[in-house]
Amino acid sequence: MKRIIFTFLILFTALFNVNAQKGIDFSRTYPGGGKLLMRVDSAAKNVFYWHIFPNLPQTSFNYLPEVNNVSIQINFRKNINITNYRYTILIDNKPVVLNKSIDLAQLKDVDRGEGDVFRSTTLGTFPIKGKIITTLVYDIEKAQDIDKSVYYGKPIPRAKIQGFSKRFKTELGVDYNWIKDPKEKTNLILTEKDDELTLVKDVSDIDYLYNTTIKDKKTNKIIFKSTAWEYGGIISEDHKAVPYIKIDKNIFKKSGEYEISIQPSINWTNCRNCDISPKEIEKYITRHTLSITLDEENYTKKELLIYALIVAFSLGLIFLVILFFIKKRNKKKLVENEQQKNMAKIQLNSIRSQLNPHFLFNALSGIQNLMNKNEVDNANKYLSKFARLTRNVLDDKELISLSQEKTLLDDYLQMEQLRFGFTYEIISSENLDLANIEIPSMLLQPFVENAVKHGIAKKGIDGKISITFMKQAKDLMLSVTDNGNGFDIEKQNIGLGLQLSNSRIALLNTIYKENRFILAMQSTTKGTNISLTITDWL
């Protein structure tokens, strides 16, 4: 009696498990890819879901080796126009639903948590054991963007290597040497003429699922990896494009054994109720050994490191010797440059010491001229301007601001106006900060003085002088223009002030080597223009 009861319990448990296996657990959902979710048998294990591939970003792969039935559900966010969507379902590549619209009446609101509400409906429940179900979902306004989800209920086939080919150079270009149906190990000799190795795989409906790696068995390091197969270059006997990959010969650095692995791109831990052992996973992996012999050996990293250190030490020693002599030469050159610069400054001060008496003599002559004309009031005004001007002229500053230079020129021209009655203007561009831009002191004064004495002195009230401070990119442009009778630039007898100024500019170019002081003169019977450009000054 006990034996009968025990047997009955065993049968009941078995029947219960079978029914549980066939029944779908609608309380548990899995991502199916894109907008799709799926539900599977209650007792199903090893449900590998939602695998996406770099070369096929809109294709999702779901591996369901222990599932009998799958329920496929589609979800839409509230803001999506569902009427535009269509779907197609294929079982073993045969359409069972073709370009069908979503049944709006069947849509239900589903809260996925955190207030994320979707509109959802079921596309159907399908037997999956031993089958491949493919769903295509697309918006008719973007028909080219198709989300493809594959539900794979068959055992994934182990990839088979159909052959290898070596490509080598010939006088006419390249040729190939084929090894078909290789065994577990292939011996290859790679010569200097060989440049590429091609690996050919058998054709399957899921070629995109397989990735290929090559590992150096000595170092246990991966030296090559590919997740995409090429098509079109090799055709099988039944006229199908065969998948293949190209491998650069240079990945093989040393003679030795290399392991090729072709396996499905499935994360075996990305599943629910995972119960798959490493031994079972190995059933999906194709392994092949390449025994490579190189006629020209490449150096190991250790050898390269030793040689690199020797070369680096030698180069470093040479560099230090060269650096020593360069520093020694630069130090000598720096001393010479400093001596040259100091000499130029001494000469510059000498020129300035000549300019000051020259200017003072001319100014005193002007006062004397007014006194001789009995213009006592003008002489007193002249003398007042002359006093402030003298203080600025005798100031020993090497650089003064443009604002100070403008004041100095204003004082001088107002002083000379009392004698000759001419008009003048000093114009500066708005983008110049006169108070914070410095130039060598009394840089323009000799040119202005020349314009007065030799340009417009005889014109009286008809004389006019225009002075401009302009900015052009990083250059400072200064100019003095008068409407006098002009002079012959070539004769060089244009007054001591201009001669000294030419010498001064030449010396300034030796001191400020990063800048250039460029003097240009134009003179006609209608007037004279003197422009001075200081490059990269601003």
Image: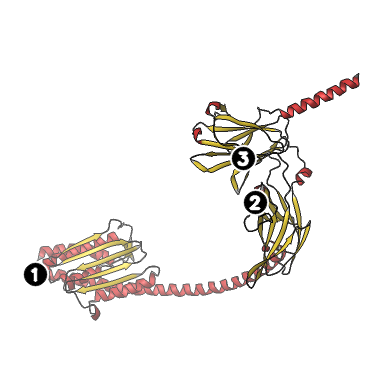
Report the residue that reaches farthest toward the top.
1
Q: Give the left or right position of residue 198, taking residue 289 as reference.
A: left
Residue type at numbered disc 2: Thr
The crowd level at tag 3 (other Cα within 10 Å; few <14, some 14-19, many 20+) is many
- Cα gap from disc 3 to disc 2, whole angstroms: 19 Å
x, y percent for residue 322: 57, 73
Q: Helix, strand, or loop for circle 2?
A: loop
Q: Give the left or right position of residue 75, taking residue 294 as reference.
A: left
Residue type at numbered disc 1: Lys
Q: Is residue 283 above or below residue 453?
A: above
Q: Quadrant of residue 137?
A: top right
Residue at label 1?
373
Residue at label 2?
227
Earlier in the chain: of badge 3 and badge 2, it is 3
The crowd level at tag 2 (other Cα within 10 Å; few <14, some 14-19, many 20+) is some
x, y percent for residue 157: 73, 46
Earlier in the chain: of badge 1 and badge 2, it is 2
Viewport quadrant of the C terminus? bottom left
Q: Select label 3 or label 2 by which is in front.
A: 3
Q: Helix, strand, or loop for circle 1?
A: loop
In the image, which disc is placed on residue 149? 3
Quick one: 466 or 505, which is closer to the camera?
466
The crowd level at tag 1 (other Cα within 10 Å; few <14, some 14-19, many 20+) is few
Residue type at numbered disc 3: Ser
Q: Residue at x 83, y 25 (%)?
A: 11
Count the marks: how many?
A: 3
- Cα gap from disc 3 to disc 1, whole angstroms: 110 Å
Q: Residue at x 80, y 27 (%)?
A: 14
